[in-house]
Amino acid sequence: MSTPAFKIGFWSDKEFHLDRMGLRELTVAYFQYYAIAAYIAVALVTGGLALTAVIEGRASLPGVLAAVVAAFFLYPVVWYALHRYVLHSKHMWRSPLTAGVWKRIHYDHHCDPNNLKVLFGALYTTLPTVALATMPVGYLLAGWYGALAALCGGVIQTCVYEYFHCIQHLGYQPKWEWVRQLKKFHMAHHFHNENGNYGITNLWWDRRFGTFYEGAKDMPRSPTVFNLGYTEDVAKTYPYVARMTPNWPYNANPTQRKREAGSAAAAN
């Protein structure tokens, strides 16, 4: 499995699985992850520049605030569309130029949903995407300082998104009901049928476009929930992901893989 480019503190060669972690341990790991540190740094710089411009009269407060609000509303629909139409498409594995990215940012996560090291989005894909989704509308509303403010809002939302995504994979029931509901629907996306519940922190767009489902009674169990359709037959034609995957082919079901590993260890 892919690992972060930098290893700081918690982030060593040891693997960590969210179903065996508590909220405190997750929080420590979260703030030591290099991408989260980068998002926070970007938010501080862009937010500081925009705020300074407002204080010094070089940017209008209403325009900058409008840019942040616009980013707030744009973020969920952009990530819904990316998750549904890009990450769950059948196209990225077909090219050697995109297969590695797809494997890193989504295939590995579905093959091993509770592995913390492949849950976070890759910084080199996430940050440019947030910038493209937020900065143009911010610029239209308030010029370059509006663009910076919108980017600041986008990366803050990314931090929140990633944290709640982690919480949904923890092996415990959250205290807040709305978080429990988010966890329930996201676990269905990972362990029952991947063709729905694309939202992580906001399921409004799933409801709007008909991809929301409550649970097993609403959708049949998907045979590709763990491999996203990248099967051994597909790999014969498009072998790029398989070549980058250790021990290929392997059982895509993480629960069954653990059982097989345990049986092998006991036999030895």
Image (tube, helix red, strand yellow):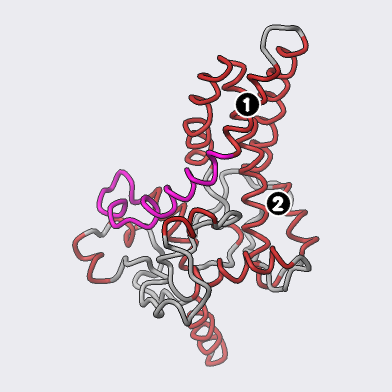
Q: Position of residue 204 (x, y in %)?
A: 54, 55
Residue type at mark 2: give it: Tyr
Taken as a whole, is the magenta stretch helix, strand or loop? helix
Note whether 63 is above or below 107 in the view shown. Answer: above
Q: Name the residue under label 2.
A: 30
Please state which of residues 67 and 97 is positioned toward the viewer in this rendering.
67
Please state which of residues 14 and 167 is positioned toward the viewer in this rendering.
167
Q: Where is residue 110 in the image (x, y as percent from the top left)?
A: 47, 65
Q: Quadrant of the C terminus?
A: bottom right
Q: Is mark 2 on a helix, strand or loop?
A: helix
Q: Residue at x 66, y 45 (%)?
A: 159
Region of the chain picked out in magenta, as a range: 73-99
Q: Earlier in the sequence, mark 1 or mark 2?
A: 2
Q: Which residue is drawn at 67% across and 53% down?
A: 163
The extreme front residue here reads 208
CA separation in Å, label 1 and label 2:
30 Å
User: Magenta stretch: residue 167 in it?
Assistant: no
Note whether 38 is above or below 32 in the view shown. Answer: above
Q: Is residue 224 left or right of residue 72?
A: left
Instruction: Name the mark on residue 119.
Output: none
Q: Residue at x 59, y 67 (%)?
A: 114
Q: Is residue 82 left or right of residue 68?
A: left
Q: Name the residue under label 1.
A: 66
Q: Where is residue 253 in the image (x, y as percent from the top left)?
A: 45, 77
User: Magenta stretch: residue 85 in it?
Assistant: yes
- Circles 1 and 2: CB distance less than 8 Å? no
Q: Where is residue 84 in the image (x, y as percent from the top left)?
A: 40, 55
